[in-house]
Image (tube, rainbow, N blue to C red):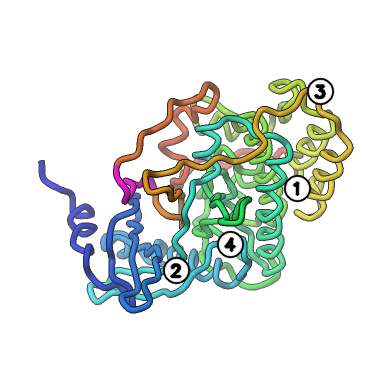
């Protein structure tokens, strides 16, 4: 069996120098490029290097999105956003950027392995995400792709979690601040259907922070229930539900949850942007108050996040977007996939979740 051009290009970089770093292994790869583990030859620092495929680099829009991913994350500069260390272009024309190497796993991977989370654990994870998202909005940037795959969990040596928000590949500057870094084609739908706001599902190019608030509400629902609020047999079915169907109540799946939590999610998932929380801080304040005032009927089954441990005692994993891989083979050896949990399947959406989909623009139910 002959290897593809992208596979040969990926192998050709092993042992080579990219910027100031030497490539040691392939962490993961996707349709647009590869992510490598690399090391500074003198300082010994480990980093992750994301490299754009040579054929993808022929698209000016793809290159602009790739560079925007690095620049947007660097521009915000929040401790809960993956740190970008360098950006450049290799002699063969391939673009790359260097970021911190994260050890751990994505929130999506954790949910697939452990199932729904306790309220306290949700708060532990969402607090830093909310802080990063607030800083993003203050910088005039709308992320537009908040989802469990883009939230990375790393264990701290002293205990607890380090949480990072990833992937600014389709981020866009908010209206009134500056021109968008990347122009979205008319009629193009960018994002992940399972977590997109109604206005984003309709293909609106004028998205504000309310779109990220909606996605964060959908992520909270997924953390508590183990599946997104809206699912279907195809992308169109999910888009219609986001735009027209009332959000389900988490208590229908977990009756022990307090009613106040459903009230918070119902507002975050409101169809009209103006009916959602004014900002991420307001959402988190309401969530904190709901958790503190509620008494659970039964103790939650999960109160801590347990990350997979490799044979050397380290915790490693792959993330999505500018995390540490896109469907990675682990550098420590082949990983054993956990048995899927009921209700977590994304059906046929998984194959198109991060693709650009062109659909007829439906009527806007919030207008």
Element type at marker 1?
A: helix
Select label 1 or label 4 by which is in front. Answer: 4
CA–CA distance in space, label 3 to label 2 = 49 Å
Q: Earlier in the sequence, mark 1 or mark 2?
A: 2
Q: Give 221 or 113, whichever is nearer the viewer.
A: 113
The answer to which image quadrant residue 215 occupies is top right
- Above or below: residue 333 compared with residue 302: below
CA–CA distance in space, label 1 to label 4 = 25 Å
- Above or below: residue 60 compared with residue 10: below
Select label 3 or label 1 by which is in front. Answer: 3
Residue 232: x %, y % from top left: 54, 26
Select label 3 or label 4 by which is in front. Answer: 3
Determine whether, in the image, residue 59 is placed left or right of residue 107: left
Say if the magenta span includes residue 327: yes
Select label 3 or label 2 by which is in front. Answer: 3
Select label 4 or label 2 by which is in front. Answer: 4
The structure residue drawn at horizontal position 38% and vertical position 66%, both measured from the top left corner, is 60
Q: Give 339 or 54, whichever is nearer the viewer.
A: 339
The structure residue drawn at horizontal position 61% and vertical position 56%, both measured from the top left corner, is 158
Q: State the mark number for residue 297.
A: 3
Q: State the mark number for residue 273.
A: 1
Q: Earlier in the sequence, mark 3 or mark 4?
A: 4
Q: State the mark number for residue 67.
A: 2
Q: Residue at label 4?
A: 81
Question: What is the span of residues highlighted in magenta in the rendered image?
Answer: 326-333
CA–CA distance in space, label 1 to label 2 = 29 Å
- Quadrant (top left, top right, bottom left, bottom right) of the C terminus: top right
CA–CA distance in space, label 4 to label 2 = 16 Å
Residue 96: x %, y % from top left: 36, 68
The structure residue drawn at horizontal position 46% and vertical position 73%, both measured from the top left corner, is 85
Q: Residues within 10 Å of mark 3 (few under 14, many from 20)?
A: few
Determine whether, in the image, residue 211 is placed left or right of residue 357: right
């Amino acid at each position: 069996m002959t290897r593809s051009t992208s596979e040969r290009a990926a192998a050709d970089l092993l042992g080579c120098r990219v910027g100031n770093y030497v490539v040691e292994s392939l962490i993961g790869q996707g349709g647009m490029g590869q992510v490598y583990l690399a090391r500074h030859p003198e300082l010994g620092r480990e980093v992750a290097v994301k490299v754009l495929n040579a054929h993808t680099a022929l698209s000016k829009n793809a290159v602009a999105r790739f560079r925007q991913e690095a620049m947007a994350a660097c521009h915000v500069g929040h401790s809960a956003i993956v740190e970008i260390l360098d950006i450049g272009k290799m002699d063969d024309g391939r673009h790359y950027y260097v970021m911190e190497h994260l050890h751990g796993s994505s929130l999506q991977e954790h949910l697939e392995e452990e199932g729904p989370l306790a309220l306290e654990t949700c708060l532990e994870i969402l607090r830093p995400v909310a802080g990063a998202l607030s800083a993003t909005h203050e910088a005039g940037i709308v992320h537009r792709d908040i989802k469990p795959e883009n939230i990375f969990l790393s264990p701290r040596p002293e205990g607890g979690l380090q949480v990072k928000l990833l992937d600014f590949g389709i981020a866009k500057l908010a209206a009134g601040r500056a021109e968008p870094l990347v122009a979205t084609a008319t009629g193009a739908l960018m994002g992940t259907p399972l977590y997109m706001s109604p206005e984003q599902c309709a293909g609106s190019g004028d998205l504000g922070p309310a779109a990220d608030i909606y996605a964060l509400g959908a992520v909270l629902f997924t953390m508590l229930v183990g599946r997104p609020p809206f699912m279907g047999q195809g992308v169109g079915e999910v888009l219609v539900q986001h735009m027209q169907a009332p959000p389900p109540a988490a208590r229908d799946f977990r009756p022990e949850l307090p009613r106040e939590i459903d009230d918070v999610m119902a507002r975050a998932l409101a169809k009209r942007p103006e009916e959602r929380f004014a900002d991420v801080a307001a959402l988190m304040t309401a969530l904190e108050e709901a958790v503190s005032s509620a008494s659970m009927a039964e103790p939650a089954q999960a109160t801590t996040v347990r990350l997979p441990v490799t044979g050397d005692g380290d915790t490693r994993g792959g993330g999505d977007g500018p995390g540490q891989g896109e469907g990675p083979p682990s550098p420590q050896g082949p990983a054993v996939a956990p048995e899927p949990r009921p209700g977590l399947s994304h059906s046929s959406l998984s194959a198109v979740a991060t693709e650009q989909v062109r659909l007829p623009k439906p009527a806007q139910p919030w207008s």
